Amino acid sequence: MLRHSLPTAGLVLVCIGACGKKTDPPEPTASAEPSAREVSGAIASVSASAARAPQPPPPRTPDPKLYQWLSDKGAPKATETLLARFDTPPGYQRVEAETGSFARYLRTLPLAAPGTPVVSYKGEELRKGDDEYLAAVVAIDVGKIDLQQSPDVVIRLHAEWQWSKGARDMTYRGATGLDMPLFRWARGERVVAVGSGVFWLKKANPAELDHAEFRRFLDAVFTWANSTALSQQATPVEAKDVAPGDFFIHLGSPGHTLVVLDIAQKPDGSRVALFGQALNPAQNVFVLRLAGATPWFSLRPGEDVITPYTEAFTWQGLRRLSAGAPQESAP
């Protein structure tokens, strides 16, 4: 709460004369008491200044409270954040990202040390640390099974962000259209195939929702989700509204996604972005770069987004997962 120092009503100044006798206090004048308009103006001025006050800058070292997987086995050791590693190109500034937003969360993603290679869930090296298209490896685990594939990266990052905010009502969708809410997993239900369909059935005892149990839930989601289901759950985004956390998607088999990790802009409106992805089989999430050069890719609405390893992405494939109410609510 802001407190304002304003003139006090009835303030009396007492003078001591040359003869040593107290003089009578002066009569209060109209200016001694601030008017309602003056008080209102002072408060409005302070409030406006507070609203214009810049937000504290994001941390340049990873916060283990935000990225709880850092304490899990299998994650590369984190050395710094995305923000600390990648300065913007000359003339560009990062777009605003509110505290607690998905954009802010991605901006401070923990990165592994420079030169870290991309490895598969088996530990096999897939891309050398000095690969010309590899800018950095995100310090997040892959898992021990071939589950966290390309489209699942979007779900993993989005779910971890919600978890860091205390959300426990998240829901993701399976390929059959079945919603997979966390609350059903917590009470011991599991998704199983029965005949030609998949259903929730009671298969285990209720579990405490710590991060390890949450991580097991995500593996179950990755088992049943695919790019088509992800696209159906997400909302199409117009090119002019693209923001960190949005993603481009290829449908079909295999599906593929490209995550917008950060955006910087020039005064003339020109924009560039940092992209993250992981391919198949399940492997480290990594930040892309142009061949041996900058990791910042131009965003030109109407022109395909061309990146290494995959076919070009069109703006018609730009999507966003909301953090709103889940598809299926707990009873």
Image (tube, rainbow, N blue to C red):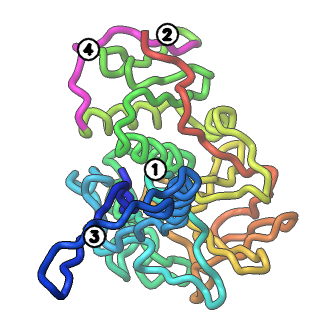
Q: Which residue is mark 4?
A: 204
At mark 2, the secondary structure is strand
What are the residue bounds of the magenta stretch?
197-210
Q: Which residue is mark 1?
A: 157
Of marks 3 and 2, the one in the foreground: 3
Q: Which residue is mark 2?
A: 194
Where does the image place residue 156, in percent across and percent down from the top left?
45, 46
Mark 3 and mark 2: span between their CA atoms?
Answer: 88 Å
Of marks 4 and 1, the one in the foreground: 1
Front residue of 301 and 312: 301
Q: Is residue 301 left or right of residue 17?
A: right
Mark 1 and mark 2: span between their CA atoms?
Answer: 30 Å
Mark 2 vs 4, N-terminal side:
2
| Residue 128 seen in render | yes
Q: Which residue is mark 3?
A: 13
Mark 4 and mark 1: span between their CA atoms?
Answer: 27 Å
Mark on residue 78? none
